[in-house]
Amino acid sequence: MRPLTRRLFFPVVILVIAGFLTWNGRHRRATEMAAMEAFASQVVSGGAAGATEPVLEQAVRRRLADRRAYTLEVREGDGGPAPDGAASHVVMVRVDGLAFLGLRCRYDSDPDRMAIVGMFEPGAGAVE
């Protein structure tokens, strides 16, 4: 019985570690998505915009000034680490079910360092 235990020990350990890493990655991704949705909702509603450049913050608010009913849809962005110009997430602002504005956002565990790094109109090129 002992040789069977030895043969199964490492494969079982590997499967347990792989399962934990998969669960941890999914949990972290879901947490980041929820945080980005809360951040974008806050910015769109006129709240704090974290580390977003003031010019970009004003452009987003100006674009959404007359829109009242909206929904937000968070997607993954450029992938990989998000340096200053890269977007870790893309938040689509939908008005009446149609994509109205896309916000390229950078996630950070510190809400004051989250930022909108760009915006675009769906179906068009980059706006800013």
Image: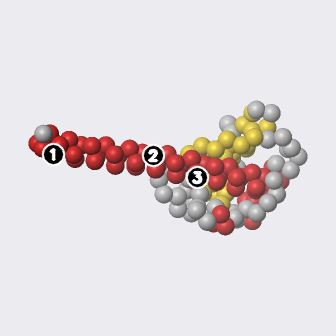
Mark 3 or mark 2: whose residue is earlier in sequence:
2
Reply above or below: 120 against 58. above
The residue tagged with tag 3: helix, strand or loop?
A: helix
Q: Quadrant of the C terminus?
A: bottom right
Check disc 3 and give the amino acid type: Glu
Check disc 2 and give the amino acid type: Trp
Reply above or below: 64 against 115. above
The residue tagged with tag 1: helix, strand or loop?
A: helix
Q: Classify residue 5 as left or right of residue 46.
A: left
Q: CA distance from mark 3 to mark 2?
A: 14 Å
Residue 21: x and y in percent read 40, 49
Q: CA distance from mark 2 to mark 1?
A: 27 Å
Q: Which mark is residue 6?
A: 1
Mark 2 or mark 1: whose residue is earlier in sequence:
1
Q: Which mark is residue 23?
A: 2
In the image, what residue occupies the spot 17% across and 43% down? 5
Q: Residues within 10 Å of mark 1 (few under 14, many from 20)?
A: few
Residue 68: x and y in percent read 86, 44
Q: CA distance from mark 1 to mark 3?
A: 40 Å
Residue 100 in sight in this render: no
Q: Which mark is residue 93?
A: none
Check disc 1 and give the amino acid type: Arg
Residue 99: x and y in percent read 72, 37
Q: Residue furthest top?
A: 97
Q: Which residue is mark 3?
A: 32
Image quadrant of residue 35?
A: bottom right
